[in-house]
Amino acid sequence: MSDQLPQDALLVLAASEEHIPLYQEARRRCMPTIAVDMRADAPAFPFADAALQVSTLDAGAIADALGDTRPAGIVVGATDAALASWRALGLRYGTPYIYPDRAFAGLDKAAFHGVVASCGIDGYGWTASDDPDEVTAKAAGLRFPLMVKPVDGSGSKGVTRVTRPDDLPAAIAHARAYSASRTVIAEEFVQGQQLTIDLFLRNGRSMMTCIKDQEVVAGGFVVRRISTAQLPPAEHGHLEATAERLCRALGIVNGPANFDLVLGLDGRGRVIESNPRLSGDSIPRLHAAARGVNVVGALIALALGEPFEDYLAPTRNAHAAVELIGSPLATDGELLRWEGVTEARNTPGITDVELYAEPGDLVRPHNQSGHKIGTLIAAGPSVADVSSSLKAAGALIRPIIRPTTGASEGTWR
């Protein structure tokens, strides 16, 4: 990585492990990259041609650090924090793609309820406020159980499932601690099949749609496994059309978006949350494994003003799944070593093994999406084949973790 900033480079706003595929794809295209991240040890810095240790929240500071360097394009992957800077810097430098202003409504869970209603999509009871007493009073009148969250949060941070009114104050205080605006939303819990839907649009129509099942860690809300869903064609088409309507309402005419939704016990789909950007949790690699599409390549092409349709043309039709590896401990620990990595990679059906933690790293309990320490990705002709591959690889790979408190040393699973 050079200290000299390259002209006409791709400016990548964030350098987390989720962004590594962006840098790898740019390098494959011989496109220089400038990474921006406030952390000196950002995992993707080694993959960039140059780096700026600046907060992705501060568009002005990024521009100052760039000086006379003008990027050819700007891109953001799986992070909400940098989206405002994506738009501001795109306008400043006149890049080919400008992140849409209306899409920011998708980052505010209360505002997004209004977007859903404007599209004529079924909703459910909710209340939101920056006044804890107001949320407590109004939430008590909703149908329990409730999900209490920061209105501007992501990655399962600050989320609590509440079954009775007496537990609301503690849950609201917990959610406020994770909210930049100190605003909390309480929503009625929707029973049913937990799904996510990813799209990549061109001129308001999806060029790539993938609907996936979600399984969560036992006793929590953090996703453990994400698999391509088996839905009847009519149901798939209905959900795709619903997501396209939401994208257009959010001003997303070209580019990626994803939504969390539930197929309720009454057979009706209800959209829970919006992520107006590329998915995290190695979902781009799942798309590649299942359909042979390259959403990361499409995003870079979009950012540079190039045609991106060919990246989204499917070349296979397989089942695929991502399993997230997290700490088995309920307390912080130190990763001592990984065992069985080579054997897991050589397991039939496994397409990717990604490790996000190295020996000596602090490892936190897997109670947030950002606390995962690795992923396994598998593909195959059937759901059973994929599950078998993940089970076999999961039995082989072992993160050995020493607790920083009195808990017993543990391994994954």
Image (tube, grey):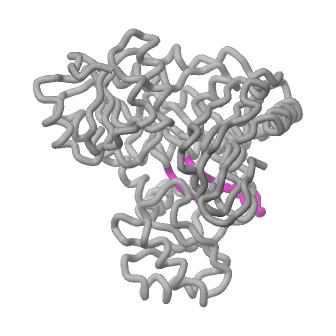
Place of residue 390 in the rendered image (x, y in percent of width and height, measured from the top left):
80, 35
Image: 87 above or below 329: above
Front-most of 109 and 150? 150
The residue segment tinted magenta is 259-274
Q: Residue drawn at (21%, 19%), measured in percent from left and top?
A: 4
Q: Position of residue 289 (x, y in %)?
A: 68, 24
- Residue 272 sits inside the magenta stretch: yes
Res. 212 in view: yes
| Residue that appears at 16% across and 43% down | 60
Foreground pick, 111 / 10: 10
Q: Quarter-wise, where is residue 329 in the image?
A: bottom right
Residue 94: horizontal and vertical position, in percent? Answer: 19, 28
The answer to whether residue 411 is magenta is no
Q: Is residue 117 left or right of residue 323?
A: left
Q: Residue at x 40, y 37 (%)?
A: 42
The quarter of the image holding the N terminus is top left
